[in-house]
Image (cartoon, rainbow, N blue to C red):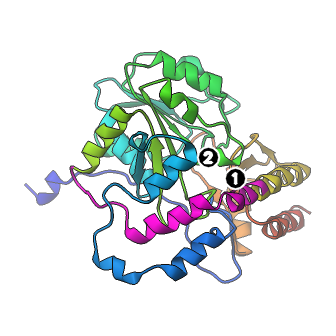
Amino acid sequence: MSWEDNVRKVVPYVPGEQPNKSNMIKLNTNECPYPPAPGVHQAVRDFDIDKLRLYPSTSAEPLADALANYYQVNKNQLFIGVGSDDVLAIAFLTFFNSDKPMLFPDITYSFYDVWAELYRMPYKMIPLDADFKIQKEDYMVPNGGVILANPNAPTGEQANLADIEEIIRANQDVVVIVDEAYVDFGGESALPLINKYENLLVVQTFSKSRAMAGLRVGYAFGNEKLIQYMNDVKFSFNSYTMNTPALQFAVAAVEDEAYFKETTKKMIATRERSKTELKKLGFMFTDSKSNFIFATHPKYKATALQDMLREKNIYVRHFTKKRIDNYLRISIGTDAEMDILFDTLREYMK
């Protein structure tokens, strides 16, 4: 008998590579290529460091007020956590406790099955169709809960909101989570549905469109009872999840709506231009509504392209998963960064 016999062994989530090189172009982790809002810079300069001796707000004030005002929801309909990963992990622990399997796509955010394995929850991966789209009928079967990333990752595909609503309506005996990490890049949010369906949780993040991946701020919307259940779980193991600087700097980001809209508009424009340039190079890809493009090339292996780009200090993401092992996920950078990527690909393919 060994102490290791009682260890909970899991296969962990593997995050994107985090190189730290000068003059690199980092297009592998879907970070925003632009800095946080000017108001955030000012909030950093004005921060009273003496506040660090005190515990932060357990109710995530003043960020909760700012988000409730911005999205026009009641604060009791809002849950705030340390990045959307924290929010989703707590949601899994709170809601997915059935003997029936939870459902999610076979190609999606690869943390979902990790959490299910960690928490010993039954789950079933539903295959996307040949075009990497969900089929709503696949989720209208007995289950222990549903989670859908919309737009999906790593494909970038946006499911029709009417189809999402049909899935929610067909599963009112379980909780349906819509993970909207990329919704600000042209997607349609399910947020308006939270007052219509008690079983809906909508999750968003500051990591992508608000350029604050390093701050770790995530949040979720749902009916008051659903949010209370999540808070009960949260306060059962950690009352002080959000640190004081994060709460204050995040407020500044929410308040600068003009900068937020300007940044997302620029990234959408660069994404659409990138689709044109990649198509000229012979790439095929889904019609992404996110801040990345999921592309494959009929003549070049994804691994060879990734290796070539890495040698040029350009980083993109490759997945070794079945069905997508010849695809690259290319985050949208600045126009200048994308031009270097296209020039490098042209030179290689020439």
Which amino acid, by three-letter code, is at mark 1?
Phe
Which amino acid, by three-letter code, is at mark 2?
Pro
Residue 19 can be seen, yes or no: no
Residue 151 can be seen, yes or no: yes
Instruction: Identify which residue is drawn at 67% across, 61% down.
Output: 316
Q: Earlier in the sequence, mark 2 or mark 1?
A: 2
The residue where tag 1 is placed is 292
Instruction: Identify which residue is drawn at 83% across, 70% down.
Output: 336
User: Is 154 left or right of 53, judged from the image as shown?
Assistant: right
Residue 198 in picture, x, y percent from top left: 42, 26
Q: Is residue 222 above or below residue 293?
A: above
Q: Which residues are magenta?
A: 236-265
Residue 329 in picture, x, y percent from top left: 67, 53
* SS majority, magenta: helix
> Mark 2 falls on what kind of element?
loop
**Are there few (<14), some (14-19), or many (20+) residues within 10 Å of tag 1?**
many
Q: Nearer the viewer, residue 104 or 321?
A: 104
**Alpha-carbon distance for marks 2 and 1?**
8 Å
For the N terminus, which image quadrant? bottom left
The residue where tag 2 is placed is 154
Q: Nearer the viewer, residue 341 or 46?
A: 46
Q: Is residue 187 above or below residue 22?
A: above
> Mark 1 falls on what kind of element?
strand
